Amino acid sequence: LNNNNLIFLLRSAMATLLPLLFVLSLFSGPISQVEGLGVGINYGQIADNLPSPTRVASLLQSIQISRVKLYDANPNVLRAFAGSDVEFIIGLGNEYLYNMTDPAKARAWIQTHVQPYIGRTKITCITVGNEILTGDDLQLKSYVLPAMQGVYSALQELGLTKQVTVTTAHSGHFRQLVPAFIRVI
């Protein structure tokens, strides 16, 4: 076998085995941590007949979910998970980006949406914006870095940077225009 054939065989084996290993892991007992990283979910709240945040907290803890991405900073959810070991990534929506470029507004957002809960709920990260770089709104894209800087500065002023990091959320295929914005961030 030459190197190209070996690489092809390894890729084929991985493509076949990884989904199989995932399915088998579902039947192998309780969900366990993978290399210490834990298992996480996205917690969306735009639907009908959702269970209460308290019920969701109980459910997620019972199946050993250790990380949650919350698309906003819903105080009912953050209170429901108080005292749990679940780590939260909270989202700061696109509609807030421009305001987060103002240091006073960024600080006020952190003081309202993060600081009251951080002592009991494990908020570890804030995602500033959602799927902005893959969209067409150039003005909104131009706010991402200044908004991230505003949020980070507010966390720094409040002494929370050791507990909470700042990032932005993206998925999917990046266009040619996107690398210029990512390099800046």
Image (cartoon, grey):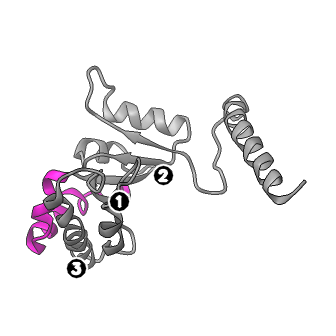
Q: Which residue is mark 2?
A: 85
Residue 21 drawn above or below residue 98: above
Can you give x and y, in whole percent of width and height, for residue 36 in the image?
63, 57
Instruction: Work out whether residue 44 or residue 137 is closer to the camera in this orientation and state it.
Output: 137
- Tell me which residue sits at (55%, 35%) in the image: 63
Cα separation, mark 3 vs mark 1, equals 36 Å
Can you give x and y, in whole percent of width and height, for residue 109 in the image?
15, 61
Q: Which residue is mark 1?
A: 176
Residue 101 drawn above or below residue 45: below
Give the quadrant of the C terminus.
bottom left
- Tell me which residue sits at (15%, 70%) in the image: 107
Instruction: Work out whether residue 14 or residue 180 is closer to the camera in this orientation and state it.
Output: 180
Callout 3, which amino acid?
Glu
Cα separation, mark 1 vs mark 2, equals 40 Å
Q: Which residue is mark 3?
A: 157
Q: Quadrant of residue 182?
A: bottom left
Residue 168: within the magenta? no
* Chain part drawn in magenta: 94-122
